[in-house]
Amino acid sequence: MLLGRDHSMLLMLTYLVLHGISSVLFSMAIALIVPKRYQKPRVWLWLYLIAFNFFMPVIGLLCALIAILTGVLWPKTERGAEFDTAMAPRFTTIGKREGSGFHGTRVRAQLSNSKVPLSERLNALVAIQNTPTRSSGDALRRLLTDPADDVRLLAYGILDSKEKKITQRIAEARLQLGVAEQGELRAVLHQQIAELYQELIYQNLVHGDLLIYSCDQMRDHAQMALLLNPAESGLWFMLVRLELMCSNVAGAQQAIYHAEQHGFSRVRLLPYLAELSFLQKDYERVRQLFSEISFNPSVSAAPQIHRYWTGETR
């Protein structure tokens, strides 16, 4: 029709209609042999093939067949999921057999070395986020000045979250204390607040002026609880640890005396008695106390300290 001499508009319209119908039929035929993985969405596939064949006569059909042949011979590989869920690795501060989890020294080495890949450092941070900050706090605080934003923010978030959990409990206990009327209940609340401040101190979550404030608050609430219940030997023991940490010899001596008087275990008091004697420079007393102390062999430094003070040999 197009090669004839008649070039009227009616001829062009007739050609376009016939060409459009053939493009639809070709597209439907091609859609039937397209591999299943490429058949959806089906409507868009038909529209694409129709447009391809209509605007590129003959060549469009050849290109479509070549594309189908390519898809059959070299199929598209399925892309795996970008992310997967993994269990957080377990962290331990003491040596365990190979393959049982993260070793404490290895985690600290990964965190402190900025040349370690960021993903490995973040994995190490995830590994220690649920461990007591007594053992991981110093490493986390050093990371607050880390050049990597992700490491710095995650370390800050871990420390801030742990501190907020304890301070929130302190605030709740203070509110209960404000409305409590019974002496026994007030003693329990004072003790609870003192224990929470002790946790802030022991976990290394407070430093500087906040540490001084926490020590004062712990001491005040412990003493208030002891005024209501002086026979609570555990509170006296808490004060022993606090006063020794603050190098308050007189306060520690008084707390140890009351702890012993109210039946606190002497075995547990022995290391603190030795520390108090050392602060008092009574080294002979330190030797006598060390001869009574039996150390856990898993604590690597304890046997050497024991031999030093007792004069024992291997």
Image (cartoon, rainbow, N blue to C red):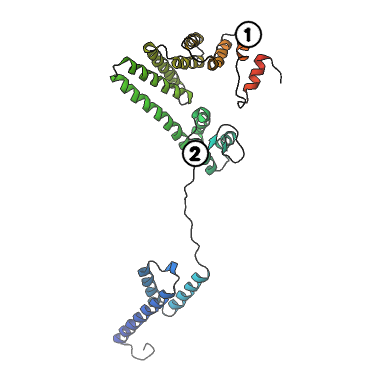
Task: Please state the total of marks drawn on the protein image.
Answer: 2
**Depth check, front residue: 205 or 308:** 308
Give the residue type at disc 1.
Glu
**Mark 2 neighbour class, 10 Å CA radius: few under 14, some 14 to 19, many 20 or more:** some
Q: Can residue 274 be seen from the camera position used here?
A: yes
List the single residue furthest toward the bottom. Answer: 5
Question: The residue tagged with tag 1: helix, strand or loop?
Answer: helix
Going 56% across and 16% down the picture, which residue do you hit? 271
* Viewer-side label of 2, 1: 1
Residue 147 in view, yes or no: no
Identified at 58% across, 31% down, the residue is 94
| Amino acid type at image mark 2 | Val
Q: Which residue is mark 1?
A: 284
299 to 234, vertically: above or below: below
Left or right: where 36 falls relative to 285: left
For residue 11, what is the image quadrant? bottom left
Asked if marks 2 and 1 touch (Cβ < 8 Å), the reply is: no
For marks 2 and 1, the one nearer the N-term is: 2
Q: Using residue 14 as the reference point, say whether residue 160 is left or right of it.
A: right
Q: Nearer the viewer, residue 122 or 99?
A: 99
Q: Quadrant of the C terminus?
A: top right
Q: Whole-Å distance between the Cαs marked 2 and 1?
A: 47 Å
| Residue 81: image location, x then y, percent | 47, 54
Please tell me whether mark 2 sits on a helix, a strand or a loop.
helix
Residue underneath mark 2: 126
Measured from the top left, where is residue 136 in percent x and y?
52, 31
Q: Residue furthest front?
A: 263
Where is residue 138 drawn, in percent x and y?
52, 28
Q: Nearer the viewer, residue 121 or 222?
A: 222
